[in-house]
């Protein structure tokens, strides 16, 4: 955040109206999650400019004039981390007047997931560093109200994985059932009964034996699976995995 936008020409007025009512600044922030085979992680950047210079934060920044919100979120994520996200979903707007010492700023937050093997984050724009941090126990102080935002994003993700096959977007192409269960347990924050979990997973009928070996290493004797994307697309609207 903090990049100054310079306009090449005056912006057109919206028809015959002139909007004179005072309004807050508008920003976007991104909570992007990954799974590192042991825990759920979130992508953070270290701020290189005031306010909160040197503090860690979610990637984000100011929305440019006439820029769609999701486009702004994708642009800021790419500029600060070098990551091009897949599907981003809007979480909520955060606009407490005191959340930004520069003035009243409203942030529209997006969240998503990514397989860590598919991205290589690199710091850019006004970010001094970028890193994956444990989503459940971020020990570092976070700028603005980003800890609150992160908690809200984790809660939304935990709700979503029971209604959409989002977990499989965190995994590489091939995986074992134990690895799927570990990812679910990390997101939901609880242990799951192995037998009951596998029974419910089988009932979804969206997995098939893997045709290649690329992906997470399996223990000796463990069967390796991959997502049947055609079946998943057909069943996406009816997806339910109450755990």
Image (spheres, grey):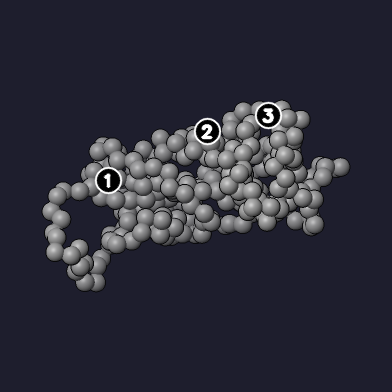
Q: Is mark 2 on a helix, strand or loop?
A: loop
Dot 3: what SS? loop
Residue at left 62%, top 39%? Answer: 240
Category of crowding for the residue at label 1, using alpha-carbon neighbours closer than 10 angstroms: few (below 14), some (14–19), many (at least 20): some
Q: Where is residue 187 in the image (x, y as percent from the top left)?
A: 58, 36
**Residue holding disc 3:** 192
Q: Is residue 232 left or right of residue 63?
A: right
Q: Mark 2 points at which residue?
A: 137
- The local crowd at label 3, few if under 14, some if 14 to 19, many if 20 or more residues have their Cα within 10 Å, is some
Q: Could you tell which of marks 3 and 2 lies nearer the N-terminus? A: 2
Q: Which residue is drawn at 31% across and 48% down?
A: 50
On the rendered structure, is 176 left or right of 240?
Answer: right
Q: Residue at x 52, y 54 (%)?
A: 87
In this orientation, does residue 48 appear? no
Q: In this view, does 21 lie above or below 4?
A: above
Residue 68: x, y in percent? 36, 59
Question: Measuring 18% from the left and 65% from the top, which residue is drawn there?
Answer: 15
Q: In this view, does 240 lie above or below 214?
A: above
Nearest to viewer (mark 3 / mark 1): 3
Q: How crowded is mark 2: few (under 14 residues within 10 Å), some or many (20 or more)?
A: few
Q: Residue 105 carries which label?
A: 1
Tell me the quarter of the picture where residue 72 sits: bottom left
**Of 173 and 145, which appears nearest the observer?**
173
Give me the C-alpha separation between circle 3 and circle 2.
21 Å
Left or right of residue 140: residue 2: left
Q: Which tag is nearer the camera, tag 3 or tag 2? A: 3
């Amino acid at each position: 955040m903090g990049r100054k936008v310079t306009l090449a020409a005056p912006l057109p007025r919206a028809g015959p109206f002139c909007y004179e009512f005072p309004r807050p600044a508008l920003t976007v922030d991104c909570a992007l999650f990954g799974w590192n085979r042991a825990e759920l992680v979130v992508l953070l950047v270290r701020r290189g400019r005031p306010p909160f210079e040197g503090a860690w934060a979610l990637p984000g920044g100011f929305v440019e004039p006439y820029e769609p919100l999701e486009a702004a979120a994708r642009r800021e994520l790419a500029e600060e981390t070098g990551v091009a996200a897949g599907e981003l979903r809007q979480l909520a707007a955060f606009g407490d007047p005191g959340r930004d010492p520069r003035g009243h700023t409203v942030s529209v937050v997006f969240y998503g997931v990514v397989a860590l093997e598919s991205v290589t984050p690199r710091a850019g724009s006004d970010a001094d560093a970028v890193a994956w941090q444990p989503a459940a126990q971020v020990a570092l102080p976070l700028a603005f109200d980003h800890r609150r935002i992160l908690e809200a994003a984790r809660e939304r993700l935990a709700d979503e994985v029971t209604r959409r096959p989002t977990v499989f977007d965190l995994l590489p192409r091939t995986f074992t059932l134990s690895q799927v269960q570990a990812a679910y347990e990390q997101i939901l924050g609880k242990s799951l009964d192995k037998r009951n979990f596998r029974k419910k997973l089988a009932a979804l009928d969206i997995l098939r034996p893997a045709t290649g070996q690329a992906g997470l290493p399996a223990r000796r004797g463990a069967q390796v699976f991959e997502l049947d994307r055609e079946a998943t697309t057909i069943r996406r609207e009816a997806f339910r995995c109450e755990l």
